[in-house]
Image (cartoon, helix red, strand yellow):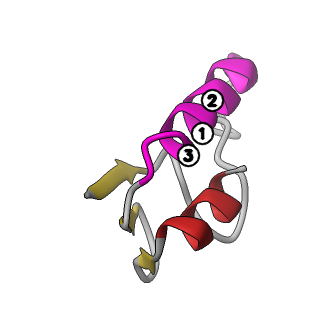
Amino acid sequence: RILAPGDLFIYAVPNAGNPQKVQRYVSDWADALDSMAALGAQTLLCGHGLPIFGSERIHEALT
């Protein structure tokens, strides 16, 4: 199972919105990370950077 969240997940920092904009949806973003973590993916293709392999590592990265 492969998860490709695009820019919703950037491994180095939280990506809760564009810093150039006032409106951000932090709670929706956090809920989305929890939902993605519950999927049990084996591979996570980050929006930027290297993929993450293994469901335990992915769950840890998303929560």
Dot 3, crowdedness within 10 Å: few (<14), some or many (≥20)? Answer: some
Q: Describe the element under mark 2 as helix, strand or loop.
A: helix
- Residue at x 63%, y 29% (from the top left corner): 29
Q: Describe the element under mark 3 as helix, strand or loop.
A: helix
Report the span colored magenta.
23-40
- Residue at x 44%, y 51% (from the top left corner): 40
Dot 1, crowdedness within 10 Å: few (<14), some or many (≥20)? Answer: some
Give the residue pinned by disc 2: 29
Q: Are marks 2 and 1 in contact (CB under 8 Å)?
A: yes
Q: State how far apart marks 2 and 1 are (Cα).
A: 6 Å
Q: Are marks 2 and 3 in contact (CB under 8 Å)?
A: no
Place of residue 54 in the rendered image (x, y in percent of width and height, measured from the top left): 47, 75
Single out the residue that lies furthest toward the left: 1
- Residue at x 39%, y 57% (from the top left corner): 41
Q: State how far apart marks 1 and 3 are (Cα).
A: 6 Å
- Residue at x 64%, y 47% (from the top left corner): 15
Identified by mark 3, the residue type is Ala
Q: Are marks 1 and 3 in contact (CB under 8 Å)?
A: yes
Identified by mark 1, the residue type is Leu
Q: Describe the element under mark 1 as helix, strand or loop.
A: helix
Label placed on residue 33:
1
In this rendering, the label closer to the viewer, 1 or 3: 3
Place of residue 48 in the rendered image (x, y in percent of width and height, measured from the top left): 44, 70
Lower sequence index among marks 2 and 3:
2
